[in-house]
Amino acid sequence: MERFEISYRLFAESQAEAQSFAEAIALENTLEIPRDLVPAGYIEDVVLGRVESVQAEFKHEGQRATWLARLSFHMDAVGTELPQLLNVIFGNASILPGVKVIGTHFNQAVLDCFPGPRFGISGVRERCGRKQGGLLCAVVKPQGSSTEELAELCYHFALAGADLVKEDHGLANQPAAPSKERIKACAQAVAKANAERAAQGDSTRALYIASLGGHGDEVKDLAFYAKAQGADAVLVIPGLYGFDAIQRLAQDESFALPIMAHPAFAGPYVLSSDTGYSHGVFFGDLMRLAGADISVFPNYGGRFGFSQAECAQIVAACHNPNGFAQPIMPSPGGGMSLARIPEMMQTYGPDCVYLLGGSLLRLGLGQALHQGIKDLRLALDAHR
């Protein structure tokens, strides 16, 4: 197949209107000139987007009619850079009302150019030594804490048995805990805890995930600094720094650390019913395409309002064995607690990173925290 395909949900009143809408999207996302000015030959036959099909989806009383359109594009319209691929998928069309990206169907040309995550599920498991069962991730916060306070949290979370110790995405380069000072101290704290775990016969280890902040042109340098200081993975916010920030790190063989993607600033991409992306495409397909190994998203029943069906869609997109890249770890956060683990496991399964922040902080840094993480580990293992 020479062309890759993208599925869109279109809001239109008739088949003819939907067909015209799809043709407008094909033109806008590639050539952006009047149709009668499109040169015949290569530009029209290859570069121009093509409408493959437009089918009615539903029309219920009181609701707008929707149509499912499949459009195809050639890699000659993309080149070799991820930002332009995203531009072709949903560039100018994202400014048009009534169009939502709901599916991706990439061909081998896309896969060859964008191989996706370097580690995926199996690689993350290998690095932390947890061969099966859900992974427990403790979140280090809040912003405003000193470097010493955050490092102490890292140490206790890691020593208590967390699989991942993640800095909160709000930890950037603030004066209370400047990035480089904080990353160095936290990496040392987790390394110390891992050494003590190993001395006690624990075959697993905690992975320290450093949050990357700063200016856009500093992300790569800070990622390599984190690696040099002993970080085991990094956290990137594609809503702020772009999917290409992830992709460039994922494809850099000299970096070679797992990457966790955070959903901050991404809400407008998915929350509208008639524009943006479906939850599965944004938090699953695009994260895998960019090269994220773990995709964080808001858990249903929490404070952000994602539905259980939307969360299940994300998990399916992250895990899809027929996807365009190796499967990755979905990571629900917000509203997580020991009491909800059995319910969460039914929805998300074992190949998932379970994110806990406030519920762990409530336990303090003593025996209660260690027992709480032990109980969480037992609950995750009981629902494989």
Image: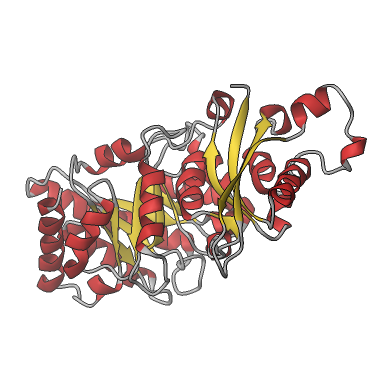
The picture quadrant where one finds residue 210 is bottom left
Residue farthest along the right direction in this orientation: 37
Q: Residue at left 25%, top 73%?
A: 359
x and y, in percent, of residue 250 in the image = 48, 38
**Rendered image quadrant of residue 97:** bottom right
Horizontally, residue 22 falls left or right of residue 210, namely: right
- Residue 53 on image: x %, y %: 63, 37
The colour style of the image is: secondary structure
Q: Is residue 354 visible?
A: yes
Furthest residue to the front?
Answer: 61
Q: Is residue 124 above or below residue 304?
A: above
Q: Is residue 68 above or below residue 213?
A: above
Asked if residue 157 is positioned above or below residue 51 in the image, the reply reads: below
Q: Nearer the viewer, residue 237 or 23?
A: 23
Which residue is painted at 51% across and 54% down in the image?
Answer: 278
Pick the front one: 33 or 128: 33
Task: Tell me the quadrant of the picture where the N terminus can be found.
Answer: top right
Residue sitting at x 47%, y 62%: 179
Please tell me whether residue 217 is drawn above or below residue 356 in the rendered image: above
Displayed quadrant of residue 337: bottom left
